[in-house]
Every structure is written in structure tokens, then in C-alpha cells.
Amino acid sequence: MSSHPIDYLLLGDNFGTPEMRDIWSEQNRLTRQTEVEVALAITEGELGVIPRAAAREIAAKADPGRLNIRDIALSGVKMKHSLMPMIAALQQQCGEAGEFIHYGVTTQDIVDTATVLQLRQTLDVIRRDCVAIADALKTLARKHQHTLMAGRTHGMQALPVTFGFKAAVWLDEFVRHLDRLAALRPRLLTGNLSGAVSTYAALGEIGPEVERQTLTRLGLNTPAIGWQSARDRFSEYASVAVMISGTLGKIGNELYNLMRTEIGEVEEPFSAGKIGSSTMPHKRNPAALEGLASLTAPLLHSASLIYHSMHVEHERDAMSWRAEWIALPQISVYLAAQLKNALEILSGLTVNKARMLANLQLLDGLLLSEKVMFETGKRLGKQTAHHLVYECAMTAYEQRLSFRDLLLAHPVLAAHITPEDLDSWLDPANYTGCASQKVDEAIRFAEQSGHLTHVKETER
């Protein structure tokens, strides 16, 4: 019976995806460990470290699909060891040749290298989904390049902006995340097969060559020196995962706030039959957005375990190492859920242009006070203009009077502005600065990065 929400039948897809759960399943863990053991045996057979016939027999008969996890678990209770029960099961499959399985290496060699194989599968999924999200953000940025909305600072309306500009900022973040994933990949996808204290003592001088050829066979990089006591590779992965999750959580929280009844500028995808509340039939809650934002915190806490694992006793210990067994699957599964959720939200997001425009008028022109100040400042000086426009703005806000009327009635300002001036200055469409231009630049930069898939051949 499942005891973690990741594996619940009812809630599991809120916390992960079937694809990522499969990558970090116990069966796949054993499969990847078997893959390492077989690759090691083949290499050692070719190099004459073990009999060639034994290596061939191991390659032919070692089958992770025939491993009985329950039987292995029962053996683990007796052996009190994390890998030996599987090695014993593989040995039984291979008969006499099984004597040469796991030759010259230690448990952590196999477990770490197999974990790296799981991380390779994980990176492929994360990158694929990050590219898809970047594509979706590019589409939103382009579509809403000129969709006016209120830009907000400190939670309050500040200046006009466009929804496309907001999406382009998110797009730019994802381009950097894709850069980070590309830079991380060769460092993370590095195996380790160097023996009990990483000195190849059991294999002797041929040890480094055994490691190199085995890792090459597995499609992994070879380390300059053993990393059993150097866990920075996993911490770097956690750091990149945290940053991607942070961006996703921020997007979820931002759209959650824009979906509030009083703001109503966006709405997450809605389908017939979706229930918002068990007691209030009218509710269309931001459930997907809440789910997206909610996973950043647990992912960050899981990552902290990885950072703690960098503290290793002497050449190796299992105290910090075991924390990775908990944290790496959680980080990967949570992030997969966020990526899938975000893609569904962004692809089906409803953008309420009319509500965005209406919200721009809530302050009855006050949103454009900066524009008025700079324009009158050209005639009166910036500081003087700031003081006079501030007086009008505060009076308009506190007494609920027309900002425009107060400006035109002001004894000093009235001599320097006309109604036509104000009509132009108080139009939010005339004060978005370089927002449209920067959307173009962000999209062009994203396309030139080589990460996006939806790029016309003429744009490459």
C-alpha cells in the first residue's frame, strides 16, 4: 500500500508523473544497477580481468526483468545490505559465471553510476518539458505583445505594461534554465567505478582502463578522480532543479493572483465537470495554479538534503549518501509534475483583455502620474513637477476626485498643459516604453539560443 502522495492513485499526478515515477521506481533502479554490472563484466572480460566466457554468460543471462523484488527485499532483511541481495540474485541467474559479477568494485560504485543513469533519463524529460514550456511562453509573448495591463510593484498598480512583456520575462528565464541544463549535463553524467576508497586497489593498474571503457559503454563520462566523497555533481543538479521550480512556482503564484475575482485578468484552463468546491457550486478555483506553486517549497526542502550530502566522513560514509536516495527521486518527481502542470496551464490559459483594460482605468488616470510628471517637468523642471503632480495625485486619491480635472485646475500646472495634452498623457497605450521592442528581443534571443523547437527555418 502506498504511503507517500507521490504514489497515491488519487493524488499521485498532483505530485509527479507516471513517466518520472517509472524512472525512479525500484524496478528501474535495479535495472540500471544491473546495466552497470553487465557493462562492467563485459569490459573486464575483454580486458582479461575475468574469463571471457564468464563475461559472455553474464551478459546473456543477467536479466533485471526476472528479478523478484520481494525475494530480494527479504534477503536484504537478512543481509542488512542495500546491494548484495541483488548481486546474489544475479549470480543465481548466471550460474558459475555469477562468481565474476561485481568484480573489483564496491557497492557505491554501482549504486552511484546507476543513479547517474537514472539522472540521464531524468534530464532528458526535464529538458524536453522545459523546451515545450519555452515554446508556449514564446507563443504567449508574441500573441499578447500589445495586450495592455497594469504592471504592479509591491502588489500595487504601478505603470502600464503588456501581458506579452510579462511572458517574455518568463521566457528569458527558461532560456537560461536550458543553458544551465546543457552546462550541467557533462558534469552530472559522469560515472564512478574505482573501488572501496576510489584507488582501484582491487583491480590494480588496469583499474582506470576498466572504468573508462565501462563508462564509455554506458554512455557516461569518466571522472578525473573518484567522486565517492565529492557529491557536488548531485548538488549542482539540485540547484538547477530548484531554480527551474522557482520560476514555475513564481509563474503559478503570479497567475493565481491575476485570477482573483477582484482582478480577473486570467483564468486557468477549465473543463466541463471540474469541481471548484464541495459546497459552493459557483466556485472555479485556481486548483492547477495552486498545485503548480505549491511544489516549489517541498522541492526546495528535498534539495537541502542533497546539499547536506556534500558533508562526507573520510573517504565514504552512508549517512549523507542515503539522504540522496530520498531526495533525488523527490526532486525529480516534483519537478516533472510542475513542468507538466505548467505546460497544460500555459497552453490553455484564458487571457481577459477587457478586464486588463478595465483594471488600467481603476485609478482614473493616476497610473500615468509619472508620464504627467515627466512631460510637465520638461517645462517646469523635474523636481518642481514631481511636487505639483504629487499634490494633485494625493488629493485625487484621498478625496476620490478626478486626477485630470485637478491637473487642469491647478494654478501652476494649468498654464503649462492643455486638455489635449492630458488626453494623450493619460492614455496607457502611450506609456509602455520599450515593452514591445523588448518582447521582440527576448523572442529573438530565445530562438537564437538553439533551444526552442518552434522556429521557422528562415529564422534560424
Image: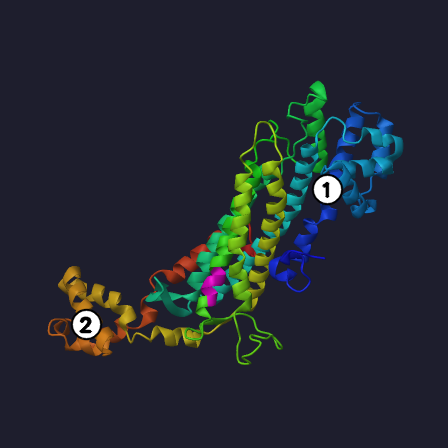
Label 1 Cα crowd, 10 Å radius (few <14 / some 14-19 / many 20+) = many
Task: Please state which of the two labelled residues, at mark 2 or mark 1, is closer to the viewer.
Answer: 1
Q: Residue furthest bottom?
A: 281
Residue at x 52% of width, y 65% of height: 289
Q: Which residue is disc 1 drawn over?
A: 32
Q: What secondary structure characterizes most of the magenta part?
A: helix
The N terminus lies in quadrant:
bottom right
Viewed as shown, does residue 370 lie left or right of 337? left
Indicate yes or no whether the magenta region holds residue 433.
no
Secondary structure of the residue carrying numbered label 2:
helix
* Quarter of the rendering containing residue 336: bottom right
Q: Vertical placement of 425 versus 214: above or below?
A: below
Q: Which residue is disc 2 drawn over?
A: 392
Residue range in magenta is 251-256
Q: Position of residue 112 (x, y in %)?
A: 66, 37
Toward the viewer: 91 or 213? Answer: 91
* Residue type (three-letter) at the residue carrying disc 2: Cys
Toward the viewer: 82 or 218? Answer: 82
Residue at x 54% of width, y 53% of height: 298
In this orientation, does residue 52 appear?
A: yes
Q: Residue furthest right?
A: 95
Viewed as shown, does residue 72 lie left or right of 278? right
